[in-house]
Amino acid sequence: MDVIVCVKHVPETAEAEIKIDATEKSIEKSGLVFDINEWDDYALEEAVQIKEKHGGTVTAITIGPEDADSTLRKCLARGADNAIRLTDPKFEGSDSYAIAKILHKAVKDLPFNILLTGALAGDDGYTATGPILATLLGISHVTMVKKIGLNGDLVKVNRELEGGLEEQVEVKLPAVLTIQTGINEPRYVSIMGIRKAMQKEIKVLGLAEIGLGENEVGEAGSWIRIKKMYVPPVEKQAEFLDGNPEEVAGKIADIIKARGLV
């Protein structure tokens, strides 16, 4: 069972102070720590578990600069057999559609039964890359996958719906599955795994190698273009009330009355 897993090298911004860069189309990345996209982390673990249970290989692939090798090394250390980095300055500004085109060219001739992606990209919030990639490949896809069961050339999956509900669907392989968090528990990277990963080759491909034109990637090849990014303005501020409970209760009552709420 050969599995391809698409991963993304993203900045960790949960506890960082975000600043917009001079182009107003991206954030200042200097000083930020980069790691594997959270949803892709679960997709990688699922790929490795499939290999351990059914045999085959796992190939990790990413689009990004040379720094993205650290994410690919983590994939190799966790059980991936092969790693591919797609790197070219022309890829900058690509939306989900352009990213899917790049990935399609890179994987269309590779042997695989299942292609996994994360359900969501933590940096730009895109969720469309997996379904678009499946359409370009001409195969089935299932999104927001929470459970996978393989049976010959069929895969039965549970996918997450709104309100805590799930639905079960069955599709024929090959297929693209976008993985939701919580489907498994990603394993820690062992020291032995790190040592082995450092010895493995990361294949690097650019625009020319995958056979796309400049007008097919980046902003020119995208459906969506970022015009401007900005930090949302603070419209309301919290007001802290001092005093004992009776005093605070009185102040709250006065505020409610002043705003005409009673």
Image: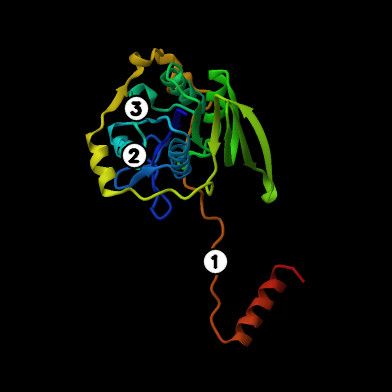
The residue that label 3 is drawn on is 84
The residue that label 1 is drawn on is 238
Q: Position of residue 81 (x, y in %)?
A: 34, 32
User: Residues at badges 2 and 3 in contact (C-beta under 8 Å)?
Assistant: no
Mark 3 secondary-structure assignment:
strand
In the depicted structure, whether residue 149 falls above or below residue 33? above
Nearer mark to the viewer, of 1 and 2: 2
Position of the C terminus, as image quadrant, is: bottom right
The residue carrying pointer 3 sits among few (fewer than 14), some (14 to 19) or many (20 or more) residues within 10 Å by Cα, namely many
Residue at position x 22%, y 34% from top?
A: 199
- Residue type, numbered disc 2: Thr
**Mark 1 and mark 2: span between their CA atoms?**
40 Å
Residue at position x 33%, y 41% from top?
A: 74
**Mark 3 and mark 1: span between their CA atoms?**
48 Å
Query: Residue 45 vs residue 32: left or right?
Result: right
Between 64 and 76, the one nearer to me in the picture: 76
